Amino acid sequence: MSKIFLALGSNKGNREEYLINAINALSSDNRIEILKVSSIYETKPYGEIPQNNYLNGVVLIQTDYSPDETYKVIKKIEKVVGRTDSVRWGEREIDIDIILIDLLVFETEKIIIPHKEFHLRDFVLVPMHEIDNKLIDPKSKIKIENLIKLLDERYIIRKINFNLTII
């Protein structure tokens, strides 16, 4: 069984509903167990495209899916939840990214683990640290808390008082 950190984000439509529906879809898969869900943060968009603020959070799951199977499952969940096609770093109803799988470091055609830009994003690092304050980046061997301190840019605006209830 692998422990996997997934980053979730939404900035289009009913952001809260998209996050809840994504977490419930993950939870309803009998091969996925949700171990922890971070707080939700309102964040400025990443990239240069003007758009609405995001709601972001991180979910720690446990599964026996392979990395490729996990990727396929989360892409299917995005579609089921309501994701439509958009430009890179554009508005999204829901976005689910695989950030870490255990302490693995690897790359396939579709997956790079750890996620290639997670160390630049406070909206991923802060909720990951909230879930596991001893976590390290398996590639750089730097503690997540230290990666947060090294950030040049900050995207988090505020923590949202919002409870993600898992059905």
Image (cartoon, grey):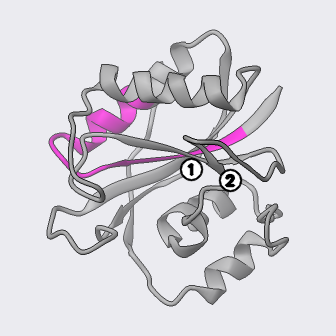
The reply to whether the magenta stretch includes residue 38 is no
Q: Secondary structure at mark 1?
A: loop
Q: CA distance from mark 2 to mark 1?
A: 6 Å
Judging by the rendered image, the residue that carries numbered circle 1 is 38
Residue at the extreme top of the image, as rendered: 30
Residue 7, compared with residue 63, is above or below; it is below
Task: Determine the residue positioned at 41% across, 54% down.
Answer: 56
Q: Measuring from the top left, give residue 124's x and y in whole percent.
A: 54, 61
- In this rendering, would 55 be left or right of 159? left
Q: Which residues are magenta?
A: 4-22
Question: Which kind of residue does numbered mark 1 sit on?
Answer: Ser
Question: Which kind of residue does numbered mark 2 sit on?
Answer: Ile
**Residue 141: quarter of image:** bottom right
- Please state, as top left, top right, bottom left or bottom right, where the N terminus lies in the image: top right
- In this rendering, would 9 be left or right of 12? right
**Residue 65: quarter of image:** top right
Q: Measuring from the top left, give residue 126's x and y in whole percent.
A: 58, 67
How packed mark 2 is, by other alpha carbons closer than 10 Å (few <14, some 14-19, many 20 or more), is some
Q: Which mark is residue 29?
A: none
Q: Measuring from the top left, give residue 90's x and y in whole percent.
A: 23, 56
- In this rendering, would 157 be left or right of 50? right
Task: Determine the residue positioned at 58% across, 42% down.
Answer: 109
Mark 1 and mark 2 in contact (Cβ < 8 Å)?
Answer: yes
Q: Nearer the viewer, residue 89 or 58?
A: 89
Return the disc, 2 or 1, that comes first in the chain's sequence: 1
* Whether residue 135 can be seen here: yes
How packed mark 1 is, by other alpha carbons closer than 10 Å (few <14, some 14-19, many 20 or more), is many
Judging by the rendered image, the residue that carries numbered circle 2 is 131
Task: Determine the residue positioned at 61% across, 71% down.
Answer: 119
Task: Determine the residue positioned at 82% across, 61% down.
Answer: 138
Q: Nearer the viewer, residue 96 or 156?
A: 96
